Image (spheres, rainbow, N blue to C red):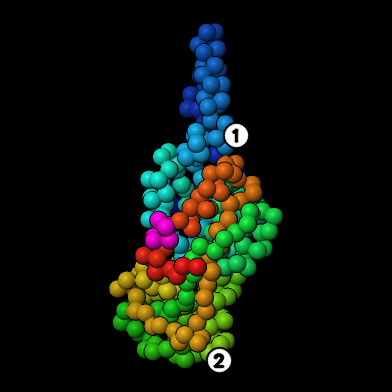
């Protein structure tokens, strides 16, 4: 299993290291070997008998990084020969990769809006998890943050996800619901980037998902949000219609609703549908 953070994938190519010409029979033998290798590697998506050995690329929202690390290991144990490559980024970046035709098999976003915008490029999506927002500060709380109202302080170094990021939209809804006008010092391309700035002490406060706060442990101080002002984020998953391994992609997307996958998500702090 390969885990890539904000990785832009592209078509790979085989590069042979020697440029020397081979005479006669050696050249013919080499050509035959190359043809055999090519035939083995282009099976139209059937990487293994029974649909258990495909190499799948899964584009997933950044907030799923920790949970999918565990989840991927469980899937590969259950599917002998299966190989998962995860690419984590903000949902809007993942959607851009899909529309640009980047090779991938499954998509999991942190909101239904982004997924719905890809209608025709995905199969029927299914919600696999839910989340909420949390307010985090560095452990020593240099900004003296006690609640949402403190985010209106113009002297506070506040970092939020950008408006095009699901966490950014959710965060703005939380602030609007609480009647708070807060100006962010920076707007980040993913919720994990927000968390990173707070962990590094480069911000006094940030709005992230509750699961991110759990994953950060003692590196951050968590301030729970009032239930009446919080939101519920939904995570839909779907196989991509452009997948080169459609059966295996559907299998993984469906497996995300299995008991093993739900257990991994729950352990990471996600709510379950």
Q: Residue at x 52, y 72 (%)?
A: 233
Asked if the magenta segment contains residue 261, the reply would be: yes
Label pair 2/1, CB-CB below 8 angstroms: no
Relative to 210, does residue 46 appear above or below in the rendering? above
Q: Looking at the image, is mark 2 or mark 1 earlier in the sequence?
A: 1
Q: Residue at x 36, y 68 (%)?
A: 215
Q: Residue at x 48, y 56 (%)?
A: 256
Mark 2 nearby-residue class (10 Å; few <14, some 14–19, many ≥20): few
Residue 63, image x, y percentages:
46, 65
Q: Is residue 136 left or right of residue 126?
A: left
Of residue 196 and residue 209, the one placed in the foreground of this image is: 209
Q: Quadrant of residue 139?
A: bottom left
Q: Is residue 137 left or right of residue 98?
A: left
| Residue 179: assigned label | 2
Residue 47, image x, y percentages:
51, 35
Of residue 75 and residue 96, the one placed in the foreground of this image is: 75
Residue 246, image x, y percentages:
59, 44
* Circle 2 SS class: loop
Q: Which residues are magenta?
A: 259-264
Q: Is residue 118 left or right of residue 83?
A: right
Which residue is tagged 1? 44
* Circle 1 SS class: loop
Residue 180, image x, y percentages:
54, 90
| Residue 166: assigned label | none
Relative to 7, does residue 131 appear above or below in the rendering? below
């Amino acid at each position: 299993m390969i885990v890539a953070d904000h990785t832009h994938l592209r078509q790979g190519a085989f590069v042979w290291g020697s440029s020397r010409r081979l005479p006669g029979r050696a050249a013919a033998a080499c050509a035959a070997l190359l043809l055999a290798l090519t035939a083995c590697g282009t099976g139209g998506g059937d990487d293994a008998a029974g649909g258990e050995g495909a190499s799948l690329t899964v584009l997933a929202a950044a907030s799923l990084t920790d949970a999918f690390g565990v989840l991927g290991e469980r899937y590969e144990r259950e599917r002998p020969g299966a190989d998962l490559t995860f690419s984590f980024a903000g949902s809007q970046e993942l959607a851009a990769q899909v529309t640009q035709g980047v090779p991938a098999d499954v998509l999991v976003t942190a909101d239904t809006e982004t997924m719905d915008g890809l209608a025709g490029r995905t199969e029927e999506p299914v919600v696999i998890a839910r989340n909420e927002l949390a307010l985090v500060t560095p452990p020593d709380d240099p900004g003296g943050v006690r609640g949402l109202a403190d985010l209106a302080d113009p002297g506070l170094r506040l970092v939020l996800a950008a408006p095009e990021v699901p966490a950014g939209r959710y965060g703005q809804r939380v602030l609007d619901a609480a009647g708070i006008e807060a100006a962010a010092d920076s707007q980040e391309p993913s919720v994990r980037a927000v968390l990173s700035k707070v962990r590094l002490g480069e911000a006094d406060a940030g709005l992230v998902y509750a699961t991110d706060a759990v994953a950060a442990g003692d590196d951050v101080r968590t301030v729970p949000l009032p239930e009446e002002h919080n939101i519920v984020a939904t995570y839909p998953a779907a196989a991509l219609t452009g997948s080169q391994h459609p059966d295996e992609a559907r299998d993984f997307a469906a497996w995300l609703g299995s008991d093993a996958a739900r257990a991994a998500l729950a352990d990471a702090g996600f709510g379950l549908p």
